[in-house]
C-alpha cells in the first residue's frame, strides 16, 4: 500500500504550516494601534533637564540667540516651574487642511477648571511655514500674575494620527519675550486660559523679565 504522502510531500506540508503560523501574526500586527501616553512619550527629569541645559548654552553662544549680545555674558540660564506629570495631557488632534497658515489643526483637550471659569475645550494649533511642527500658542493667568511672559507661551505637540500629547512642562517663551527685535505670532483668543498653568518656562523669582 502506497503512503498518502511521501516523506518529501510531508516535509513540504509541515514547512507550509510553520510559515503560515509565523507569518500570520506579523501580517496582523500593522493593524494594531498602540495608544499614545504621556508616560511613554513626554520628556521628564534627566532628559528634560539636559534639553534645558543645551538651550541655555545655545542662548549664550549662538549667533541667532534672542538674548541681546550685551546681556549674554551675564545670562545665567532660563527659569522653570518644577516638572509635574499632571501637566502632560493627551487630547484628540484634528487636522484642518483648509485653514490658512499658521493654523494647521485643532486639539480637543480636557484640563482642570476653576469654580469661576471653564477652560477652553478646543485649542487652535499652529504650524510652521510648511504646515509641520505643530504647537500651541497660549496665555494663562500666570502671565497676569507676572510669573510668565505677558504675550503668552508656546508648547510643542507630539502628534500620532488623531492623538496628541501636549506637555506644558515644555512650554517656553517666544523669542520676542527676550528681544523686541523679534516678531512673534500672538496666541489665538481660543487659547486663553483663566486657570494658572504653573509648568514650563517662567520668570525667575528675582526678575520681571528674562
Image (tube, rainbow, N blue to C red):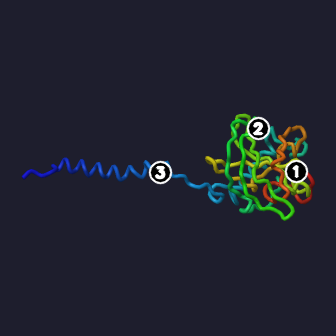
Cα separation between marks 1 and 2:
21 Å
Q: Which mark is residue 170?
A: none
Instruction: Tell me where residue 206 sits by quadrant.
Output: bottom right
The residue singled out by tag 2 in the image is 102
Give yes or no for contact between labels 2 and 3 (Cβ–Cβ under 8 Å).
no
Instruction: Point out the tag, 2 or 3, that comes first from the N-terminus.
Output: 3
Residue at 69% from the left image edge and 37% from the top image edge: 97
Q: Position of residue 99 (x, y in %)?
A: 74, 37
Q: Position of residue 128 (x, y in %)?
A: 73, 38
Circle 1: is it few (<14), some (14-19), or many (20+) Cα within 10 Å? Answer: many
The residue singled out by tag 3 in the image is 29
In-image side of 109 versus 20 (left or right): right
The residue singled out by tag 1 in the image is 149
Residue at 86% from the left image edge and 50% from the top image edge: 75
Of the two numbered discs 1 and 3 in the rendering, the one whose residue sits closer to the viewer: 3
Camera sees residue 203: no
Amino acid at each position: 500500500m502506497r503512503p498518502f504522502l511521501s516523506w518529501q510531500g510531508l516535509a513540504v506540508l509541515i514547512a507550509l504550516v510553520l510559515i503560515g503560523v509565523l507569518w500570520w501574526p506579523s501580517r496582523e500586527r500593522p493593524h494594531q494601534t498602540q495608544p499614545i501616553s504621556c508616560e511613554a512619550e513626554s520628556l521628564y527629569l534627566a532628559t528634560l533637564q539636559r534639553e534645558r541645559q543645551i538651550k541655555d548654552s545655545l542662548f549664550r553662544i549662538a549667533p541667532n540667540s534672542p538674548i541681546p549680545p550685551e546681556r549674554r555674558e551675564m545670562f545665567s540660564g532660563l527659569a522653570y516651574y518644577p516638572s509635574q506629570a499632571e501637566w502632560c495631557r493627551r487630547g484628540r488632534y484634528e487636522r484642518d487642511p483648509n485653514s490658512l497658515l499658521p493654523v494647521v489643526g485643532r486639539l480637543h483637550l480636557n484640563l482642570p477648571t476653576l469654580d469661576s471659569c471653564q477652560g477652553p475645550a478646543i485649542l487652535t494649533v499652529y504650524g510652521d511655514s510648511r504646515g509641520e511642527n505643530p504647537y500651541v500658542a497660549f496665555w494663562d493667568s500666570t502671565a497676569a500674575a507676572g510669573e510668565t511672559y505677558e504675550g503668552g507661551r508656546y508648547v510643542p505637540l507630539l502628534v500620532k494620527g488623531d492623538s496628541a500629547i501636549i506637555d506644558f512642562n515644555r512650554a517656553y517663551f517666544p523669542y520676542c519675550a527676550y528681544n523686541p527685535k523679534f516678531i512673534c505670532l500672538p496666541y489665538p483668543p481660543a487659547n486663553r486660559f483663566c486657570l494658572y498653568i504653573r509648568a514650563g518656562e517662567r520668570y525667575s523669582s528675582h526678575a520681571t523679565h528674562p
